[in-house]
């Protein structure tokens, strides 16, 4: 079920930063108290292959997001300690040294469960041992959430694990949503900052406007 248009879950999660500080982050509260948009991107595991390429790309775009009044937060189900080890591993050795935004450590899977983004294929029950086991890796897909200043989700997307994201598309979506907020116009296909928006006239016909 889509969460677009709804408030982001009010759940506090452990996190780690590049300084080795263990934090407590509530994404909903961060958006509201700082009056900022948030991009929260989930990746499956630390010390893997596609994941660091995305994490570095978000770091490269960090200043652009910040200039658009948007916070960047990464997330996985790894522990804070594993995050810190990865943050201190050089890039040429598969690490993410140099990344400065925080990484959520959803080890209890409270937030990822609420979002419904865990790779769980179902359960099996062993009557003889009275044991329930999960099928699947129980780590997250590559889910991405854009949250506005009031804590409302205005974009969500979920990629299968082998498929890396295009960071530029999230910059475009932040621009588009900001345009809607500020201009009251809508954004047609392939809209980019500086292009014409659209507005519906009284007769229901959409009209392009020059920004």
Image (cartoon, grey):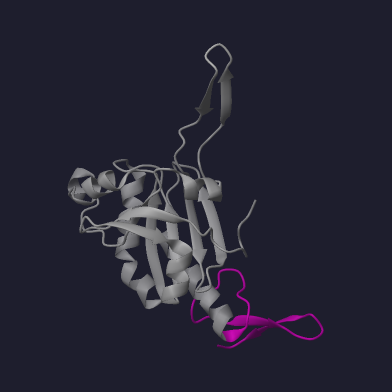
Answer left or right for 132 relative to 68.
right
Where does residue 78 sit, x and y in percent of width and height? 35, 43
Q: Main secondary structure of the magenta part?
A: loop
Residue at 27 percent of width and 58 percent of height: 17
Q: Nearer the viewer, residue 167 or 48?
A: 48
Image height of 200 relative to 62, above or below: below
Where does residue 93 sit, x and y in percent of width and height? 19, 44
Answer left or right for 194 relative to 48.
right
Residue at 51 percent of width and 66 percent of height: 147
Q: Which stretch appears magenta?
A: 183-211
Q: Residue furthest bottom?
A: 210
Where does residue 176 sit, x and y in percent of width and height? 53, 74
Where does residue 130 sit, x and y in percent of width and height? 55, 17
Write down the quadrant of residue 107 in the picture. top left
Q: Residue furthest right?
A: 203
Say whether residue 203 is magenta: yes
- Quadrant (top left, top right, bottom left, bottom right) of the C terminus: bottom right
Answer left or right for 200 relative to 78.
right
């Amino acid at each position: 079920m889509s969460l677009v248009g709804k408030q982001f879950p009010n759940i506090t999660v452990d996190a780690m930063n590049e300084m080795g500080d263990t934090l407590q982050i509530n994404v909903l509260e961060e958006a509201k108290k700082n009056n900022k948009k948030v991009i929260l991107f989930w990746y499956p595991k630390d010390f893997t292959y596609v994941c660091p390429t995305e994490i570095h790309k978000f770091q490269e775009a960090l200043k652009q997001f910040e200039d658009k009044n948007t916070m960047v937060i990464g997330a996985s189900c790894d522990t804070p300690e594993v995050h810190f080890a990865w943050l201190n591993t050089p890039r040429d050795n598969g690490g993410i040294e140099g990344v400065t935004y925080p990484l959520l450590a959803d080890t209890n899977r409270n937030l990822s469960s609420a979002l419904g983004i865990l790779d769980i294929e179902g359960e099996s029950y062993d009557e003889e041992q009275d044991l329930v086991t999960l099928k699947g890796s129980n780590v997250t897909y590559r889910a991405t959430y854009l949250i506005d200043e009031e804590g409302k989700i205005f974009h969500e997307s979920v990629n299968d694990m082998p498929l890396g994201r295009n960071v530029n598309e999230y910059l475009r979506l932040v621009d588009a949503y900001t345009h809607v907020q500020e201009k009251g116009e809508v954004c047609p296909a392939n809209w980019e900052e500086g292009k014409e928006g659209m507005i519906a006239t009284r007769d229901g016909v959409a009209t392009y406007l020059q920004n």
